[in-house]
Amino acid sequence: MGRLDNKVALVTGSASGIGRGIAIRFAREGAKVGVLDLTEAIALPVVEEITASGGTALALSADVGDEQQANAAVGRMRQVYGPVTVLVNNAAVMPAGRLHETEPADFDRCLRVNLRGSYLMSRAVIPGMLELGVGSIIHMASVTGILGLPGLAAYSATKGGLISLARAMSTDYARYGIRVNAISPGTIDSPMLHEFVVNQSDPDYYRRAFDEMHPIGRVGTIEEVASVFVFLASDEASFVTGANYEVDGGLGVKGEQPQDIEGE
C-alpha cells in the first residue's frame, strides 16, 4: 500500500527538475499522476519512466498562465482519472537581476507563470475537490520568498506571494475538506542550480558557496523535497493547512546570506 493510493495528482512543470522528482515519487506512492509541462513531448519521458516502474501517469501540456489551457489540462485529467485531488503548483521561471536590472517583460512573465499560473490551476481543480469534499493544494514557494537573497527580486516577489496565497486559500476552503499549504525549499541540487552555477565567472566557487550558506553544510536533494510533498499530499497531513514548510537545511533559521551570490 502506498501513502497516496487513490489520489489523483497533477504536478505542473514536471518534465524536469524538482517537479519531475515529485511526479515520480507520487506515482511510486500509488497516485495517478498528471505530468504537465509546456508540451506533451517533454512530459512524455517522465510518463514512460513512471509506467515502466509500474506506476500510472498521463502526459499533459499547458501554459499555466493561460486560463483556457489550464482548464483543458484539468479537464483531461478528470476525463481519464476523475477529479484532481492533489495539485502541486511547481511551474516557475526565475529571472535573475536586481530590480532596476529586471526588464518589465521578464517581471511580467515571472508573475504570469509563478503566481497567475498557480491561481489558474488552483481555480481549475477546486470545483472537483469541492464535489468530493477532499483535496490538497501545495504551492512551490521558496526560501527567497522569506529571506532577502540578492539578485532575485521578481522571483522572490512571486514566491512570497505564494506563501500568502496558501494562507488565504486555507481559510477559504478548510471547512470543505481542502487543505492548502506551501513548501519553501532552500538551494536544491537541480538543473536550475546547475544552469545558474555554470553561467558564473567562477562556477566552483559559487557551487561551494551555496553549500556553505546552508547551516547543514550542503544543498538539498530533490528526493528530500519530494518527501515533504508526499507528506502534505497524504492523509497523514489531514490537520495541516495554511502552513509553509521550510525545507532549507536551516537557512531560514540562520537568517543571513553572503551578499555576493547573485546573477552576473
Image (spheres, rainbow, N blue to C red):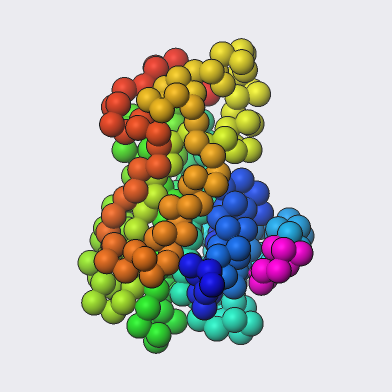
Residue 156 seen anywhere in this rendered image of the structure? no
Q: Residue at x 76, y 64 (%)?
A: 52
What is the x, y in percent for residue 181? 34, 58
Q: Residue at x 54, y 39 (%)?
A: 221
Range of the magenta residues? 50-58
What is the x, y in percent for residue 247? 40, 42
Q: Nearer the viewer, residue 164 or 54?
A: 54
Specify the quadrant that holds the C terminus. top right
Whether residue 53 is in magenta: the answer is yes
Establish if 205 lies above or below 175. above
Find the residue positioned furthest to the front.
1
Task: Name which quarter of the figure residue 156 lies in.
Answer: top left
Find the residue positioned furthest to the bottom.
131
What is the x, y in percent for residue 229? 45, 56
Establish if 39 lies above or below 176. above
Q: Residue at x 50, y 36 (%)?
A: 220
Q: Nearer the viewer, residue 160 or 84?
A: 84
Position of 238 compared to 211: left or right?
Answer: left
What is the x, y in percent for residue 19? 57, 52
Residue 172 seen anywhere in this rendered image of the structure? yes
Q: Nearer the viewer, residue 208 or 201?
A: 208
Whether residue 102 is in magenta: the answer is no
Establish if 185 lies above or below 255. below
Task: Name which quarter of the figure residue 252 lies in.
Answer: top left
